[in-house]
Image (cartoon, coloured by chain):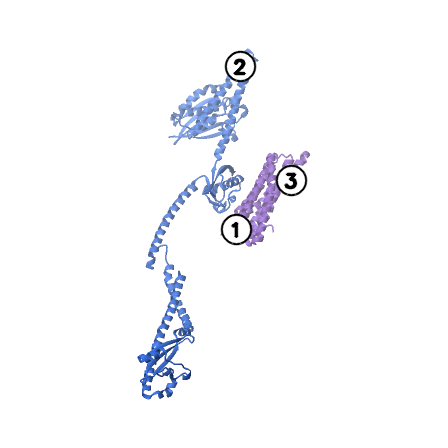
Amino acid sequence: MRQKIFKSMGVLIAASLILSYVLMIGVMYQQLLTNMEKEVQREVTYLRSALDIAGVTYLENEIVKDASNRITLVDQDGTVLFDSMEDIKTLENHKDRPEIMDAFNKGEGTSVRFSTTLGQQTFYYAMKLNNGMIIRVANTTDSVFSMITDSIPMFIILGIIVLGIAMGIARFQTKRIIIPINNLNLETPLENDVYEELTPLLHRIENQNRLIEKQLSKLNKRKEEFNAITENMREALIIINKRSIVLSMNKAATEILDVSREEGLERHFITISRDNEFQTTVEAAMSGVSSDAIIMLNNKYYKIMANPVCVEDTLNGCVILMLDVTEKQRAEQMRKEFSANVSHELKTPLMSISGYAEIMNNGLVKSEDVAEFSGRIYSEATRLTNLVEDIIKLSRLDEDNKVFEQEEVNLLVLAEDIKERLLPQATKKNVELRVLGENVKVKGIRQILDEMLFNLLDNAIKYNEDGGKAGVSVVKENDKVILSVWDTGIGIPKEHQDRIFERFYRVDKSHSRETGGTGLGLSIVKHGAIYHKADIKIDSEVSRGTKIIITFKTI
Amino acid sequence: MRNKFDEQLDLLNIELIEMGSMCEQTIADAIKALTTHNVEAARLVMETDNEIDDKERQIESLCLKMLLQQQPVAKDLRQISSALKMITDMERIGDQAADIAEIVTVANISVENLSDIVEMAEATMKMVTESIDAYVRRDLELAKKVIVDDDIVDDYFNKIKSELIELISKNRDDGEAAIDILMIAKYFERIGDHATNIAEWVEFSITGEHKGS
């Protein structure tokens, strides 16, 4: 802008210089011409009076000879009688000259003749004398063109000086015009006090500013929302651009991959994890195919899902999501083990049954042994039934549906009831049973609580020593109800204590058959406790006894 | 504007990390082959060794190209020259892992009674992982830790050596297996040394000072 203003000023100055020069020359030339004509006319008038008085001889006078103007005297027939500058013999008849002709006819005549070769013009003025002769004075001056050409060097010098000064001023002026524009405060455009012509523009900028602010705050808000979501999610979220550079990682991602943002961001994704599966999954996504895999990092399983991001069919990067599937993986593992165990446990009694039945079928059994064989078949079948029942109970607890009816159950009464039911087994093993405590009620499912307590007390009797003791105590403590089942039995070694609640887990694998358990009893107790949101703890010492404590929260 | 040199430096960085992770993988496979007599894993180790060799040549030519065409100075020069040294060590790690795998496939070794060699292998593996980590994260502290940790692997080697001497003196029939195990231990010890070298070059690329020199 500054350049432009400066340039146009320069053009303006140059144009006005040239224009004024031309005009000036014109005016000056005109002035010069008029003056010269007047002078010539005066001289002619003077000469005429002189000639009229003194006759032709006046022309012999020195003054005439020295005159700067050319003086010519022409006879009536046009012959030149006298010329102050030329030899009259060389001059031709002047009768045809326009000024002479005019003088003959009208008494005076003028004419201007140009000589282009000399760049000069000659002004003639002629007047008729009383004796009929014509006196003519001619003045030769430079023509307007030669005047221009003569004065050009001068003009150029002057022009340069003027232009120099004018440009200096122009520069200064340009600066003065520009400064307020340069100093515009575009943050608050309306507060500027500058040219009126800029006001519409400033108004517009103001509007734009407001719009931008609004959109920016909107964007910020959305970004905050996005951040709040990604930062608080448990899944890792990583965004990679098409050059395989990590653009964004959420908090979970930094924790799972154990890299800080400084180490990971703006780097190739290989820097955040060198895991092979991770690499292949991401590379697959970068080639445009969604892929997933399960990888192991720091002893935890993660499902990694990588999806390509396409904008109008061109790949722009990929989004990686990582989920912690350790629990799921473990559950899967447990389920597999469980089915394997179940099949095994079901198969064993079935094999016995079919074995005994086969022998009987083949008639290899004597009639007196039939009772024993069928007794065995019966006991194995009972085992099988118990097992299936237990599995059904467990799977029902697993399903976690609320078909059971909640009711208030008095634990002490329940314990007394179970004690009565288990009395035969207890007397058989010579175990003394005791039930102690307060009348406390908990809200729960009678059937499940019954099952739990029965299993626990049953175990307390089964794994007891001859002449031992077992019992149940129910205590209310603040807002908790503590139900404990204890015995003075064989106890559970420390290394097994963590695992006894697992399905089909046995401390003593060799004697499991004898006690007749299914291996699911404690598992049912644990699931029942979970169902009632109760805590379960075990306190046991080998050959001293075991105490299992279940803590219920009262309503 | 990213110029070509920056792009090449990034590429070098990525290639180095890739080569490092190949080394980690191959050691993990070698350990697997050793502990479980998994012939498939052993074969994989030897295959990976070839890939590592290819990678070394690739990185080497990239480094030379950069040195000749870009004439790097200061930090960039340090990075490239340390990369040139590091790939040699990585390549040796690959070779030694392949050697271990070869012994495992040929000899009949049972490491059940030698928990020390498994522990030594784990310690070596940790050193390699940490030296690569130190490079990836430009972590000076971690690099120093790797250099110090080399003593642990050396101690394991001495311990295994004396255990083997005892074994041979008790039962001469186990002599051959004992020698094989000693070789494996020695290879692990060498891998540990190479990991230390890598860590030293990482240190050099960060600080400009090399411990070994």
For residue B6, the mark is 1
Q: Position of residue A5 (x, y in %)?
A: 39, 62
Q: Quadrant of residue B187?
A: top right
Hey, what amino acid is under mark 3? Answer: Met
Say which element carries label 3.
helix
Residue A185 placement, left or right of A465: left
Give the class, few, some or many, for how many residues have Cα within 10 Å of label 1's Cα (few <14, many ≥20): few
Q: Which residue is mark 3?
A: B183
Disc 1: host chain: B
Hey, what amino acid is under mark 1? Answer: Asp
Mark 3 vs mark 2, CA separation in Å: 65 Å
Task: Kindly indicate whether the residues beneath marks 3 and 2 are on one polypeptide chain.
Answer: no
Task: Give the colour chain A carries in the figure.
Answer: blue
Q: Does residue A98 lie above or below A427 as drawn?
A: below
Q: Is residue B115 visible?
A: no
For residue A372, the mark is 2
Q: Position of residue B192 (x, y in %)?
A: 60, 43
Give the class, few, some or many, for how many residues have Cα within 10 Å of label 3's Cα (few <14, many ≥20): some
Q: Position of residue A398 (x, y in %)?
A: 45, 28
Disc 3: host chain: B
Hey, what amino acid is under mark 2? Answer: Glu
Q: Is residue A116 visible?
A: yes
Q: Nearer the viewer, mark 3 or mark 2?
A: 3
